[in-house]
Image: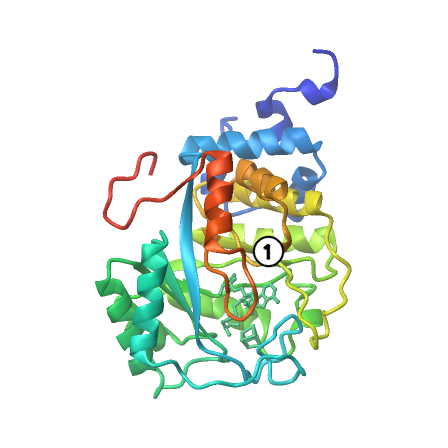
Amino acid sequence: MTSSSSTSVETVAAPALAKGGAVRDPAFRHDWQRAEILALFARPFNDLLFEAHSLHRRHFDPNRVQISTLLSVKTGGCPEDCKYCAQSARYDTEIGAEKLLALQEVVREARKAKEAGATRFCMGAAWRNPKERDLPHILEMVQAVKAMGLETCATLGMVTSEQAAALKEGGLDYYNHNVDTSEEFYSEIITTRTYQDRLDTLANVRAAGMKVCAGGIVGMGEARADRAGMLMTLANLPEHPESVPINLLIQVPGTPMADTEALDPVEFVRTVAVARILMPQSMVRLSAGREHMTDEMQALCFFAGANSIFQGEKLLTAGNPEATADRALFDRLGLKGEEPVGAAQPHR
Ligand code: SAM
Ligand code: DTB
Ligand code: SF4
């Protein structure tokens, strides 16, 4: 071994030292600086992946992937201006405004998801925030899905502390609300709500005692410094989110982001690896954009520390690989889905 790239993981990691000189476990760090994160991004790819994978193995069974399924319970007609989104009423996309789904339809979809191997069911609504009249219907859905033995997740826009408490009380396990990008790039993407609004919602969800699912999107034309900034925001929250979805932009015709230049797949894998290093005990979800990823790219993401996916041929409105394609991919890679709720989990 002659070159510097053969350095051991401890020395390439350059982890911050605690008082007294002990290496600080990144699982407990909430004080990441952007320069440190950019230094991780800049590592030789093999060194970065080796460290991310080593941390991954320390905290998780490396061959298990948690499976969630999404359902849009209220599609389209959203007043917000998120430039990537098919559901914003401001852009001329193929997605029109629909009413809230009926309870039986949600139950039917949740049953199908469970039969296909999902352990969590995530209900999404194209709202800026839920209105008071909507919540009782959402709570009925949450209770019905939970009664089927699935973990429940919802993404309904901004929530107040009272709404978060009601959702927790009604049995909601996870709330998804993404920061989407770095604080600096944010105003290029959304102008109808602030970054601070998003952080406030995440604080309300945490204070209510729900598990936090928070991540963002890459491939929106942001710089690497913005990808680092997004991960810095997430890792420096008072507690790391239990679930960190990393979405690759789906370019939706009719939105202002329809023609954004595609992100280098290697840079996407690096983003997953850095997320794993900054938040070693969180589930990192390979989220939107898998439909256009090769098996090889997804395999690299799983090696880099992704351990959760959305399964089902539709995300909220956009396409996703068929469940059969995912089963073939899992077989090809020797991966297994997480055991259903309540079953013993090795490593966790
Ligand atoms: N309306 C709610 C909100 O925005 O909080 C919930 C649903 S919203 C569709 C959930 C997340 O999906 C967004 O925050 C964004 O990160 C992701 N998303 C939406 N459209 C996307 C796209 N075209 N490509 C990648 N991710 C997308
Ligand atoms: C998340 O981070 N990704 C999911 C989920 N949370 C709600 C949504 C992806 C949406 C992709 C575009 C669509 O289906 O419209
Ligand atoms: Fe509305 Fe959510 Fe789409 Fe933004 S991401 S336009 S808030 S549905």
Q: Position of residue 111 (x, y in %)?
A: 30, 63
Q: Residue at x 41, y 36 (%)?
A: 60
Nearest the viewer among 145 and 116 is 116
Residue drawn at x 70%, y 64% as measured from the top left: 185
Q: Quadrant of residue 136?
A: bottom left
Which residue is nearer to you in this view: 235 or 18? 235
Q: Is residue 327 above or below residue 196?
A: above
Residue 63 in the image, given as x and y percentages of width and height: 43, 35
Q: Position of residue 339 (x, y in %)?
A: 31, 44
Query: Which quarter of the rendering shows the C terminus?
Result: top left
Residue 237 left/right relative to 208: right
Instruction: Report whether residue 334 is seen.
Output: yes
Query: Does dot 1 land on a helix, a strand or a loop?
Result: helix
**Residue highlighted by disc 1:** 291
Instruction: Give the residue displayed 44% in from the left and 37% down from the top.
Output: 335
List x then y, in percent, for residue 320. Answer: 54, 59
Q: Is residue 252 left or right of residue 151?
A: right
Q: Compared with residue 84, is residue 128 higher up or lower down, i.e. above or below?
A: below
Residue 133, compared with residue 42, is above or below; it is below
Q: What is the tally of numbered marks visible in this picture?
A: 1
Amino acid type indicated by mark 1: Glu
Pick the residue in front: 186 or 74.
74
Quarter of the figure with residue 238:
bottom left
Looking at the picture, the colour scheme in use is rainbow
Horizontal placement of 257 versus 60: left or right? right
- Picture quadrant where residue 130 is located: bottom left
Q: Farthest bottom residue?
A: 133
Dividing the image into four quarters, tell me where ligand 3 lies.
Answer: bottom right
